[in-house]
């Protein structure tokens, strides 16, 4: 199935400036029994800069958002951090924007199809009380989409 969305997530963990990506992969693989990490990409602070980390091939079916068939239709990106408690750093924001812009060009995806996990749940009419906050209540999706279009 053609990828037509980019889905943003957060790890709900503090970014400790070390590689958490391996721990996320291990959790998905060993604990949940998945064949790989659920996301195509991650963004994480490593040392003093944010890095883009590879998960599974974007063309593969993801394991990041079952709502609105986004595992099939969307490319999942996890930004390491808990954006329910603090806003993303400038580095995390800009690195994620750089990755998303590249994916938008590669897959011909518009900025309006860059959504948070919570927005995919809304597409499936999941009741508000049952929705995740992903990519965090302090991750401003409207502002992010607006900056992608600028």
Image (spheres, rainbow, N blue to C red):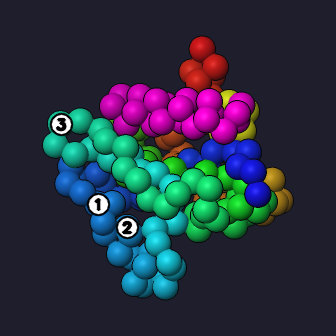
Magenta residue check for 100:
yes
Q: Is residue 139 above or below residue 111?
A: below
Quadrant of res 96: top left
Q: Which residue is mark 1?
A: 20
Report whether 85 appears left or right of 3: left
Marks 1 & 3, CB-CB < 8 Å contact: no
Q: Residues within 10 Å of mark 3 (few under 14, many from 20)?
A: few
Q: Which mark is residue 24?
A: 2
Residue drawn at (49%, 61%), measured in percent from left and top?
A: 56
Q: Are marks 1 and 2 in contact (CB under 8 Å)?
A: yes
Q: Which residue is pictured at 73% across the width and 45% down the height?
A: 4
Res. 48 mark: 3
- Determine whether the residue tagged by mark 1 lies in a helix, strand or loop: loop
Segment tinted magenta in the rendering: 90-110
The kind of secondary structure the magenta stretch mainly shows is helix
Looking at the rendering, which quadrant does residue 68 occupy? bottom right
Residue 89 lies, in percent from the top left, at 35, 34
Q: Quadrant of the N terminus?
A: bottom right
Corner quadrant of residue 69: bottom right
**Residue 122 in sight here:** no
Circle 1 crowding by C-alpha within 10 Å: few under 14, some 14–19, many from 20: many
- CA gap between label 1 and label 2 equals 6 Å
Q: Residue furthest top?
A: 150
Upstream in sequence: badge 1 or badge 3: 1
Q: Quadrant of the C terminus?
A: top right
């Amino acid at each position: 199935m053609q990828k037509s969305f980019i889905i943003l997530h957060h790890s709900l963990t503090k970014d400790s400036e070390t590689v958490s990506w391996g721990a996320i992969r291990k959790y998905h693989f060993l604990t949940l029994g998945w064949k790989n990490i659920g996301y195509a990409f991650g963004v994480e602070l490593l040392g003093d800069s944010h890095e883009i980390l590879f998960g599974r091939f974007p063309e593969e079916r993801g394991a990041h958002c079952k709502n609105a068939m986004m595992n099939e239709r969307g490319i999942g990106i996890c930004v390491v951090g808990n954006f329910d408690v603090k806003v993303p750093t400038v580095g995390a924001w800009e690195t994620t924007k750089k990755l998303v812009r590249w994916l938008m060009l590669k897959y011909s995806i518009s900025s309006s199809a860059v959504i948070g996990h919570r927005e995919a749940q809304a597409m499936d009419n999941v009741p508000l009380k049952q929705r995740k906050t992903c990519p965090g209540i302090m991750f401003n999706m409207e502002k992010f989409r607006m900056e992608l279009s600028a």
